[in-house]
Amino acid sequence: MELEEMKSLWGEISAEVEKQKKLTDQLILKMIRLNFRNKINKILIPELSGSVVALAAVVFIMLRFQKLNTWYLQAAGVVAAFILIILPVLSILSIHGLLSVNISAKNYKDTLFAWNKGRKRWVLAQKLGFYLGAILMAVILPVMVRLMDGKDVFLEPRIWLCYALSLPFFLFFTRWVFRKYLKMTADAENTLNELEA
Amino acid sequence: MPDKKEFIEIIKANEGLIYKVTKVYAQSREDGQDLYQEIVYQLWRSFPFFRNESKISTWMYRIALNTSITYFQKEKRKSNQVPLDVLIDRMDTKDELSNQRIETLYASIRMLNTVEKGIIFLYLEGKSYEEIAAITGFTVTNIGTRLGRIKQKLKANIKNE
């Protein structure tokens, strides 16, 4: 469809749409109220719940830290606690970066610029979060088993088998996730380039 | 607290504008319903900061377009939205040939990239280069250049079809 034809058809659509007044006061008020509640539910609740769980796990590890009686269990405990603190912070900061794009103060170009910069940072945070999550899974298992069951799983050969078996799955999953992120980064990069063109 | 009555009047007077933006940016009916509601919500949030320095429609175009480009990636599909079928399906009553032409038109626009989509939308809305520049933040000359490129792209797409 050529531009001139598009413009004439667009005029027809506009005329037709203008004739049809369908919004009511009630519908508008409902949209405003429901959307506000949805936003709080969707963004805040999962983030806060995740952070609370992570914080509870940190407190649990810290309170029973003396039970980790070997250097490697203590190291695993410190690493696990560190990641449990870093992960929610990283997640909240990257989401906040995207949500804080001020769409009412910026024009289309600046919004696109800020949004795509934010997206690139978000992808970076997600990648980092993915690696940290994998390390967390590896270190938290022996720590929790020791704290809750009193066993040192590093002394059992099965743990090494578990790690060895999970490695191929992790590598496969990494490739799948990163391919998805690669596309998102490429999209953001293309838009940023397009803005400069 | 913004004046609800005034806001409702403005939205009702410009409901067609919101509808057309959703048709250009949303990929499905469900997306369209979500986006429609999000635009109204964002307009409500921005309403206290509107200072009559620009036309109300210019302000609405800016918020609606900015909402559309930042919305789909940050929101995952969800529930609890107001059912808006009656708003989204408003053109479906026309004859089949018209519907087909309209769908081809939307499909042609959706094929463009995000930057071009915003510019072509405002152009089709009958905005002057100056108005498009004011809403988008590009220079008037740049708008001319980009529209030229869009024209070429649309022609190339017709050839490929």
Image (tube, grey):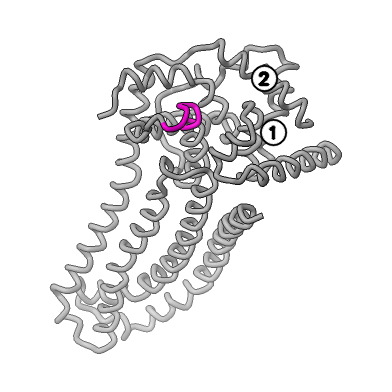
| Residue ID at (67%, 23%) | A10
| Residue ID at (50%, 17%) | B86
Q: Which residue is mark 1?
A: B107
Q: Secondary structure at mark 2?
A: helix
Relative placement, left or right, of B151 versus A21 is right
The answer to if B56 sits in the magenta stretch is yes
Q: Quadrant of the C terminus of chain A?
A: bottom right
The chain letter for the residue carrying disc 2 is: A
Q: Nearer the viewer, residue B24 or B5?
A: B5
Residue A167 to residue B53: above or below:
below
Q: Nearer the viewer, residue B66 or B87?
A: B66
Residue A170 to residue B91: above or below:
below
The answer to if B130 sits in the magenta stretch is no
Classed neighbour count for the residue bearing mark 2: other residues with Cα under 10 Å, few (<14), some (14–19), many (≥20): some
What amino acid type is highlighted by mark number 1?
Answer: Ala
Mark closer to the observer (1, 2): 2
Residue A31 is marked as none
Q: Which residue is mark 2?
A: A11
Q: Nearer the viewer, residue B65 or B135?
A: B135
Q: Quadrant of the N terminus of chain A?
A: top right
Relative placement, left or right, of A2 versus B47 is right
| Residue ID at (25%, 29%) | B1
For the magenta stretch, what is the residue range? B53-60
Classed neighbour count for the residue bearing mark 1: other residues with Cα under 10 Å, few (<14), some (14–19), many (≥20): some
Residue A90, quarter of picture: bottom left
Q: Secondary structure at mark 1?
A: helix
Residue A44 to residue A139: above or below:
above
